[in-house]
Amino acid sequence: MSFVAALLPVAIYIIVVYVLDNFALISVKRLIVLVLCGMAAALACFGLFQLTGSFLPDRVSDYVNPVVEEMVKGIPLLYLARRKKIVFFIDSVICGAAVGGGFSILENIFYLLLGGPMSMGTILFRGLEVALIHMGCSALVAAGLMFAVRLAERRRSRLEIKKKDVWMAAFLLVAAPALHVFHNAFHFNPLLQFLFVFGSMAALLVWTYQYDGDMIHRWLDRGLDKQMELLQSIKAGELAQTKTGVFLLSVKDSFPPEVFFDLICFVELNIELSVAAKSRFMLHEAGLAMPLDEEQAALIRSQYEEYRQLEKRLGQSARMTIAPVVKFYPADKKALEDLLKECRAPRH
């Protein structure tokens, strides 16, 4: 029965995923891999702390170890963020909780095997406490990395970066280890301490959710308006009516007519796919998405196939020329990836 405490994080995590992952954003395979990554992080930290424990005073380790733990747990999350697999708040919470849950499972087992005798009440409370601390802090780290990657993409594309977005990313990446340090280093009434840390993490996650919603609305509203304006100008043959169209006309003489025609088709398909993905995302968010019929799914699949063929035919130099126009940010890629997955799913 003592090992129930070690399995408690898994039960909590299942509830978290069930409540949050309405659209099956994260595959079961990835969840299992992330839980195993969390366990591997716990094993790595255990070995490291065995080495540092011989010369690092306990009081110092209370400050250092939590920071190291969050850094090690953050490695798989950073990998996912850089690969654009974490681009929305729900992604970050689910992936962060998976890594933190895996870490807490192994940490609880270590305490049961290596620690002194404890009552069942203490075991259960500690199992719950460790699970929520690790899962919550890892979720905050994942959210901070998600924001950081978004900002890096905007900087790479020479788009405006708001200072408050930079501060938000930095704040989350500092707040997670800070809360973990507070939990480990400052000891008073265990229940009050746990409630304070858990309440702070919950408040930060709610705030992050609202902040992420604001960023998503900026991405959707402004991006859709500009894309629809350009799409209409292309279909009407009036490129000179938009700033982006004027840019496309300025590079017209740099390419043979047939290549320029392919460029325009490439831009048009890029916009149509992006608009379709964003529109589908908005419907899902509002809970209004009806299943795609075979005709709709086939159209999107054919557009994407034509888009990829044009991408190969144009070559790197042509694509680099129109890179300021054809942009797929992490959120765009994720939305398109989800749309294509939906289109390729069997129809019932």
Image (cartoon, rainbow, N blue to C red):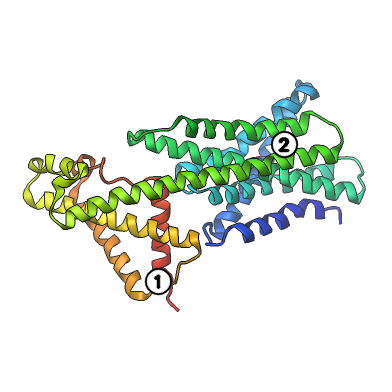
Residue at image point 43% right, 36% down: 151
| Residue closer to the observer: 94 or 291 | 291
Mark with earlier residue (2, 1): 2
Residue type at mark 1 is Leu
Labelled pair 2, 1 in contact (Cβ < 8 Å): no
Q: Which mark is residue 46?
A: 2
Residue type at mark 2 is Phe
Which element is circle 1 on?
Answer: loop
Density class for disc 1 (Cα within 10 Å; few <14, some 14-19, many ≥20) is some
Decide if residue 345 is on the left or right side of residue 30: left
Density class for disc 2 (Cα within 10 Å; few <14, some 14-19, many ≥20) is some
| Residue closer to the observer: 258 or 315 | 258
| Residue closer to the observer: 280 or 100 | 280
* Quadrant including the C terminus: bottom left
Question: Percent from the top left, x then y, of residue 231?
Answer: 23, 54
Farthest bottom residue? Answer: 348
Question: Percent from the top left, x then y, of residue 136?
Answer: 67, 44
Alpha carbon separation for disc pair 2 and 1: 49 Å
